[in-house]
Amino acid sequence: MIFDYTGFVRQKDICHDGWYGYYQEPCPPVPAAKPMAASPSALENERQLIDQLYLLQKQNRALSSRETDLERQLADRDREITALRSGTGDSALQKRADYLERQLAAAKQRISDLEAQLAAMGGAAGDEQARLKEAQRGLIRALRPQIEKGNITVDLNNERLLINLASSYLFGSGEDQLKPAGADTLKQVGAILKDFPEYKVAVDGHTDDRPIRSGLKKKFPTNKELSEARTANAAKALTEDGLGAVTTHGFADTKPVAPNTTEAGRAKNRRVEVIVTK
């Protein structure tokens, strides 16, 4: 055993005060902690906000360009009118000046309208996104246990709010009647969405590409009939607590979100979507 001046026992396998063991070799550096990767949902929300910002900037540039063109025309007309007013008093020149003044007034009005449109566009887009975000937050709070289990996702972009519910959570295999938990969840969704009456709500049903089993063919000849029946029952539960009328569609296996070549892919395709749009 070797003691240093502090009384600490120096051992060959222990790092102390920056030195390694009694060989007096520097301690190896401590690896830097790897930064935590952003969650997929955070990255998706960031991407959606960037897309929305890009679209608004594109529209803003188009309107600003139009406004600049009109202002250039105004300057040209002002110069022409000034030149005509300083002429000899010819009646033809006077008529031309009067005509240009009317054009000038109309152009000024168009610029004023464009400025109002630009202001309204920015405000309306912000208000619209804020309302949808409010609905999204309410749904996430109410459905957090099901979201954490992977039974439900709530996704927002600049066009719509999408609530995706796994069919296995809502229905038994080959059945169109809701499970009690699935019915309760849809009632919760409807109770939240009824506070946003300015939006339209659609319920879409989807299946995988597996054919209907022979024992169920009398009730559901194809996946089309199964998806329509499930959608109708989901819509009924959704509107039970006061949500207004919704539209329904049964798409069967025509709109897959994953390949039907694996069980995991087929499970993703068996779903009911509640879509909220302006």
Image (cartoon, rainbow, N blue to C red):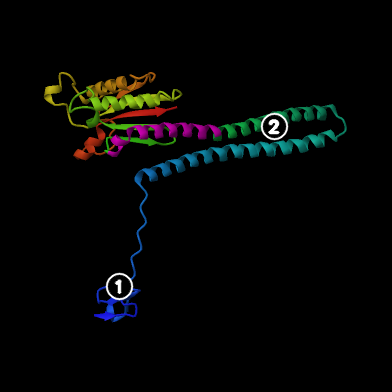
Q: Amino acid at mark 2?
A: Lys
Q: Which residue is mark 2?
A: 108
Quarter of the rendering containing residue 16: bottom left
> Which region of the structure is painted magenta?
123-148
Q: Amino acid at mark 1?
A: Cys
Instruction: Please tell me which residue lies in front, 236 or 268.
Output: 236
Q: Position of residue 116 (x, y in %)?
A: 62, 31
| Residue pictured at 60% horizontal, 39% vertical | 64
> Can residue 261 be seen at all in this image of the molecule?
no
| Residue pictured at 35% horizontal, 32% vertical | 142
Q: Which residue is mark 1?
A: 15
Quarter of the rendering containing residue 167: top left
Q: Is residue 268 above or below residue 217?
A: below
The CA span between labels 1 and 2 is: 79 Å
Quadrant for the C terminus, please: top left
Q: Is residue 136 magenta?
A: yes
Q: Position of residue 134 (x, y in %)?
A: 44, 33
Q: Is residue 172 above or below residue 78?
A: above
| Residue pictured at 44% horizontal, 25% vertical | 196
Quadrant for the N terminus, please: bottom left
> Can residue 151 be seen at all in this image of the molecule?
yes
- Helix, strand or loop at disc 1? strand
- Say whether residue 229 is left or right of residue 127: left
Q: Position of residue 236 (x, y in %)?
A: 30, 19
Label whose residue precedes the other's in the sequence (1 or 2): 1
